[in-house]
Image (cartoon, rainbow, N blue to C red):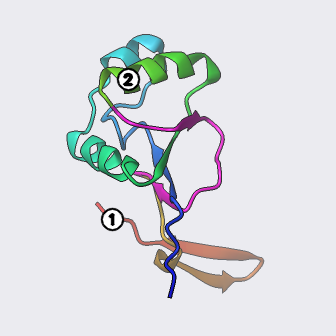
Amino acid sequence: MMKNHRKKWIAVDLDGTLCKEICFTAEEVSKATPVKKIVDKVNEWHLHNSIIILTARRNELLSATAKWLDKHNIQFDAISNHKLAADIYVDDKMVHPRDIKSENKGPFDVVFIKCQG
């Protein structure tokens, strides 16, 4: 049987995931602290996959963000502040569907999310 050796697209969040801080200015971006174990894992994944850096940062911070990524030797193929299709998403605010329970309570559904941390 032939195996599928297609590269996976892995989307990695920036603020709170690749760096400890949440950044709103170019100065904050330049001073952000990388999370070493996540950086190391992203660089390892990049050897056999494609990495998309996903961020909610405004357009005017993307240049400073790319410089920060380069400064900290973080390997990536694309950066976007729009959600793109990917095979895997890595995000500090991620909720897995199995952790969501919904109960019908009249005109509204009540959603319970099991949070870790």
**For the point 36% across and 49% down, which residue is it?**
47
Q: Give the residue type at disc 2.
A: Asp
As helix, strand or loop, the secondary structure at mark 1 comes to loop
**For the point 65% across and 49% down, which residue is it?**
84
The residue singled out by tag 2 in the image is 70
Q: Residue 29, position in %: x, y?
A: 40, 20
Taking depth in this image into account, of 114 and 5 the one nearest to the observer is 5
Taking the view exactly as shown, the residue that stands out farthest to the left is 36
Taking depth in this image into account, of 28 and 46 the one nearest to the observer is 46
Relative to 95, residue 26 above or below? above
Q: Residue 86, position in %: x, y?
A: 58, 57
Q: Are marks 1 and 2 in contact (CB under 8 Å)?
A: no
Crowdedness of circle 2 by 10 Å Cα count: few (<14), some, many (20+)?
few
Q: Earlier in the sequence, mark 1 or mark 2?
A: 2
* Most common SS among magenta residues: loop
Q: Residue 89, position in %: x, y?
A: 49, 57
**For the point 35% across and 39% down, which residue is it?**
18
* 82 in the magenta segment: yes
Label for residue 116?
1
**For the point 78% across and 77% down, which residue is it?**
107
* 11 in the magenta segment: no
Magenta stretch, residue numbers: 74-92
Q: Give the residue type at disc 1.
A: Gln
